[in-house]
Image: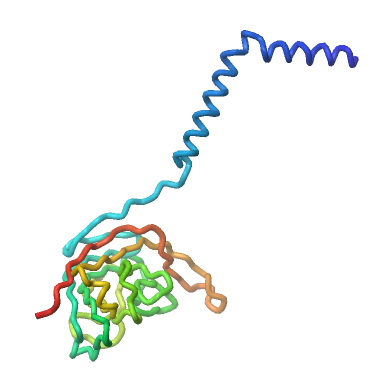
Amino acid sequence: MSGAVRGHAAQLGRSAVGRASIPFWAAGIALVATLVGTLALGGFDQAQTVPERLEAGGEVRTSLYTVSVIDAHRADEIEEEYVEAEDGEVLVVLTVRLENLAPYPIGVGSSADRVSARLVNAGEPLLELSGADPASSARVWRTDDSSGGVVLQPRVPAEAQLVWAVPVESVADGQVTLDVYDAVETRGRVILSSDAITWRRSDLAAQFTLDVAETP
């Protein structure tokens, strides 16, 4: 029995190195070379989303909200809102139009009804000045002089101003970049509120390059 097994193994060995097996070995070597080359070039890496490049006047539509930048400028103070830049800082003021695409209200600068949209003033905000290193949290208010926090109702566009205090050198070239991130809706991640909703940022959807001339 053992002799038969040895004989069969010897036959397989001769077949593996025989001339008839050469095409199979060549195909295998070519396949391995292709896989190695693909891995070296990152062929199996997850595709990266290329952010859209926009200027003032453009609009970005994500899965949960839209944003367009109407105006951008810099200032030392905004008297009517009692906001003033500290020494070595300047205020970057963006007037934006926002629309909430979700079926529930969201707050821009804070949570609303157990919904944390995290548009600004979060560890990973959906709207962020790129490389500006703000000195404090963003200030947010409506442009229609209404008081209170900015809450966006579903499918109702609203204009608001977003204001960051940043180091003067951040706008030395007269421009700022606003990063706009897409978001993923997650539910039940808060221990005491299983029905809480949180928007967590995902891909960088777009970047606005904005001129920030000083207010006359």
Q: Quick check: 33 above or below 110?
A: above
Q: Position of residue 216 (x, y in %)?
A: 9, 80
Judged left or right of residue 40, residue 51 is left
What residue is shown at x 39% (from left), y 72% (from top)? Answer: 118
Which quarter of the image is occupied by the N terminus? top right
What residue is shown at x 24% (from left), y 88% (from top)? Answer: 84
- In-front residue for pair 173/92: 173
Q: Tell me the quarter of the picture where residue 121 sits.
A: bottom left
User: Which residue is most to the left?
Assistant: 216
Q: Quick check: 60 above or below 87?
A: above
User: Which residue is most to the right?
Assistant: 1
Label tally: 0
What residue is shown at x 54% (from left), y 20% (from top)? Answer: 27
What residue is shown at x 47% (from left), y 65% (from top)? Answer: 186
Q: Position of residue 177 (x, y in %)?
A: 26, 65
Q: Position of residue 98 (x, y in %)?
A: 26, 69
Q: Tell me the quarter of the picture where residue 75 sits.
A: bottom left
Judged left or right of residue 138, residue 116 is right
